[in-house]
Image: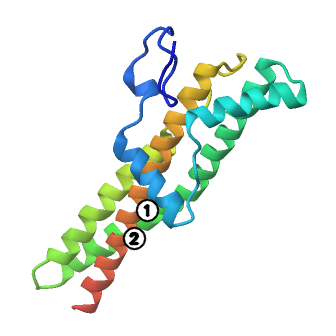
Amino acid sequence: MSHPPDRPPLDEPSRPAGEVETRALYERIVQFRSDHLAGQAIPPLAALIDRIEERRRLLGETAEQATQAVVEDLEEAAASIHWRTAPLMPICGLVVAGAGVIDKFTPALPVLALSAIFLAIVGLYFSVVAIFTHAGRRAVGLTPTRKDVVFARARIIKKEANAQIGAVLTTLALVVLVAAILTI
């Protein structure tokens, strides 16, 4: 039976859409960043499956060993996203605190300060989603399967896209805060 390269075979049992499919918007965000901004490139599912087959053929690994190596690579990539996203948390707090001070102690309309607060909070939301999105094996301690590769790839795309959205919004909030400070 043929199937699309980024989807599981048709004879596999159906799973909730959140486990396998990623939103097209997430895919586009990750693709744009990896193409134009030197971001982390996430290979298509077909390339990951090919890598498993190559490891089995060239290195003589069992299917379980080859699958485990691919899943571990995806888990390491997810950890790097986590570490890149973590510094955004205190920046969001500083922007909200600074904008709150400007709002409280300036007589002018607080449009810029409130905009900075809003952008920082929305950026914080996406950053938190990125940090707490699990992108690895579904069941720790068990031998990973190809289903885990599908799951990990879909979740790492979601994690990376949310991290990128959070970074852009937090940076924009910081710029708006600086503009609010300069207008005082």
- In the visual, does 177 lie left or right of 79? left
Relative vertical location of residue 158 with respect to residue 9 in this rendering, above or below? below
Q: Secondary structure at mark 2?
A: helix
Residue 143 x, y percent position in the rendering: 73, 17
Q: Give the Cα separation between the discs numbered 1 and 2.
A: 6 Å
Q: Which residue is mark 1?
A: 167
Asked if residue 8 can be seen in this view, the reply is yes
Q: Which residue is mark 2?
A: 171
Relative vertical location of residue 31 with respect to residue 38 in this rendering, above or below? above
Relative vertical location of residue 76 with respect to residue 37 in this rendering, above or below? above
In this rendering, the count of numbered labels is: 2
Dividing the image into 4 quarters, which one contains the C terminus?
Answer: bottom left
- In the visual, does 112 lie left or right of 174? left
Relative vertical location of residue 110 with respect to residue 85 in this rendering, above or below? below
Q: Which mark is residue 179?
A: none
| Amino acid type of the residue tagged 1 in the rendering | Ala
| Amino acid type of the residue tagged 2 in the rendering | Thr
Residue 149 x, y percent position in the rendering: 61, 28
Dot 1 crowding, Cα within 10 Å, few <14, some 14–19, many 20+: many
Could you tell me if the residues under marks 1 and 2 are in contact, i.e. CB atoms within 8 Å? yes
Q: Nearer the viewer, residue 104 or 139?
A: 139
Residue at point 48% right, 21% down? 3
Residue at point 20% right, 82% down? 105
- In the visual, does 116 lie left or right of 91? left
Residue at point 28% right, 87% down? 181
Q: Secondary structure at mark 1?
A: helix
